[in-house]
Image (spheres, rainbow, N blue to C red):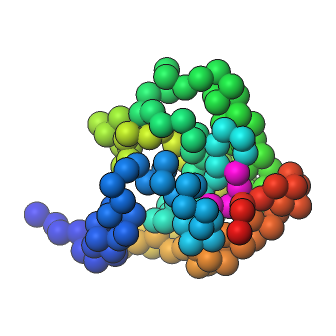
Amino acid sequence: MKQLWAPWRMEYILNEIDKHDNCIFCNFPELKEDEKYMIVYRSSKSYVILNKFPYNNGHLLVVPYQHTGDILELDDDVLLDVQQTIRKTVQVMKNILYPHGFNIGLNMGRTAGAGIDEHIHYHIVPRWDGDTNFMPVISGTKVVSESLEATRKKFSAEFTRLFGNGAHK
């Protein structure tokens, strides 16, 4: 049996994210510390946050404020806002990262791959031709070339420039 050595997972397991009593996707926006929690944009019904353990540089999540693990329970106005926020996020990514494509999706339920299944969230992953190079193929390692803090600053500034109400500081 091959063992996967992933010491960074312990940070995730022990991180203060998991020390909150309630849902992190509900708590983070309420704490009003957008820089600390990597929130880059807020709309009236949803917000955009960096994935702390990204698949690619710029991997973002669009999260409705409405707490539910089931898309069928989202209010219509929330669903519309989420879709509009996804569209805005794609525009910001195109302006900053110049990706060749995107993976955009929702994993609903733990069995479907949701790491946090009690609160739905959409993943938006920018993709580039050739972004799967020898590292993931040979060593199972993905290289993310920029810090989350630097990426957050770029995204927050571009959301503010385009839509006028970027993340609250």
Q: Residue drawn 68% across and 25% down?
A: 77
Does the magenta segment cover residue 41? Answer: yes
Q: State whether residue 67 is above or below residue 133.
A: above
Q: In this orientation, does residue 34 appear?
A: yes
Q: Quadrant of the C terminus?
A: bottom right
Q: Nearer the viewer, residue 85 or 168?
A: 168
Q: Position of residue 51 (x, y in %)?
A: 52, 60
Q: In this orientation, does residue 124 appear?
A: no
> What span is in magenta?
38-42
Q: Residue drawn 57% across and 41% down?
A: 65
Instruction: Please tell me in which quadrant of the rendered image residue 122 appears.
Output: top right
Tell me the chief SS of the magenta region: strand
Q: Residue drawn 64% across and 49% down?
A: 47
Q: Position of residue 90 (x, y in %)?
A: 74, 48
Q: Nearer the viewer, residue 21 or 127?
A: 21
Q: State whether residue 51 is above or below residue 82.
A: below
| Horizontal side of residue 98 vs 110, given as left or right | right
- Residue sitting farthest toward the left: 1
Q: Quadrant of the N terminus?
A: bottom left
Instruction: Please tell me in which quadrant of the rendered image residue 17 appears.
Output: bottom left
Q: Position of residue 89 (x, y in %)?
A: 73, 50
Q: State whether residue 106 is above or below residue 142.
A: above
Does the magenta segment cover residue 11? Answer: no
| Horizontal side of residue 16 vs 61, given as left or right | left
